[in-house]
Amino acid sequence: MTYIAFSTNRGFASIEDNFVNGFQRVVLVYDCWSSHFKTVCKTHQLCTAHLTRKLVFFEERYQSKWATDFINLIHQALELKKNLTQEEYQKPTIKRTEILLELNILLQTSVPKEQKDLCAFHKRMAKYKDYIFTFLFYYYVPPDNNARNVQ
């Protein structure tokens, strides 16, 4: 479900005004806008489409192997999502565990300090790593919030 509220800004005050009680039983799917992390909800899912677009930018700008590896990991996770049965979301799976381990390795891999925007993205992903592959744990949680853009 998508809920749209008009506001003059995307700050947390606007979220509080429109969603007084938050979304205690909902997994919110969105980009990395900081005010969204303050919203009361069950958990979060970062939009993989937003992440991928940013990673493609880093790939093209810096020829970043790290960005390429991250894109490949997202694609592996999306493929796994297609193949998981509803029951498999409730129990450990080898492939999901491998993806999470690979994510941890990727986030422990340093990126060039002179690539400031890539460093900032890397730091943000490390901070919010628990929300990158939430969709692999919930059957009804999509990996992105772009469904409304698909024709």
Image (spheres, rainbow, N blue to C red):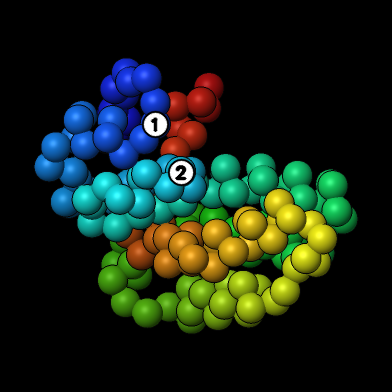
- Residue at image location 44% in from the left, 27% down from the top: 148
Task: Identify which residue, 108 or 89, lies in the foreground.
Answer: 108
Question: Left or right of 11: which side holds 148?
Answer: right
What's the amino acid at mark 2?
Trp
Q: Nearer the viewer, residue 64 or 98?
A: 64
Tally of numbered tags: 2
Q: Is residue 52 visible?
A: yes
Identify whether 87 is placed above or below 53: below
- Image quarter where the N terminus lies is top left
Q: Residue at x 85, y 53 (%)?
A: 62
Q: What residue sits right under mark 2 in the picture? A: 33
| Inter-mark Cα distance, 1 to 2 | 8 Å
Estimate the x, y position of residue 45 in percent, counting from the top left. Answer: 40, 53
Q: Residue at x 32, y 18 (%)?
A: 6
SS state under label 1: loop
The quarter holding residue 57 reads top right
Contact? badges 1 and 2 (CB < 8 Å): yes
| Residue 27, image x, y percentages | 29, 51
Q: Tell me the SS state at disc 2.
A: loop
**Residue 10 tag number:** 1
Crowd band around label 2 with a 10 angstrom C-alpha radius: few (<14), some (14–19), many (20+): few
- Answer whether residue 140 is visible to the viewer in this image: no
| Residue 131 in the figure: left or right of residue 107 | left
> Which residue is nearer to you in this view: 5 or 76?
5
Whole-percent x, y for residue 36 in the image: 36, 45
Q: Earlier in the sequence, mark 1 or mark 2?
A: 1
Q: Amino acid at mark 1?
A: Arg
Q: Residues within 10 Å of mark 1 (few under 14, many from 20)?
A: few
Residue 97 vertical position relative to residue 26 in the rendered view, above or below: below
In the image, taking residue 127 as reference, residue 88 lies left or right, namely left
Quarter location, residue 30? top left
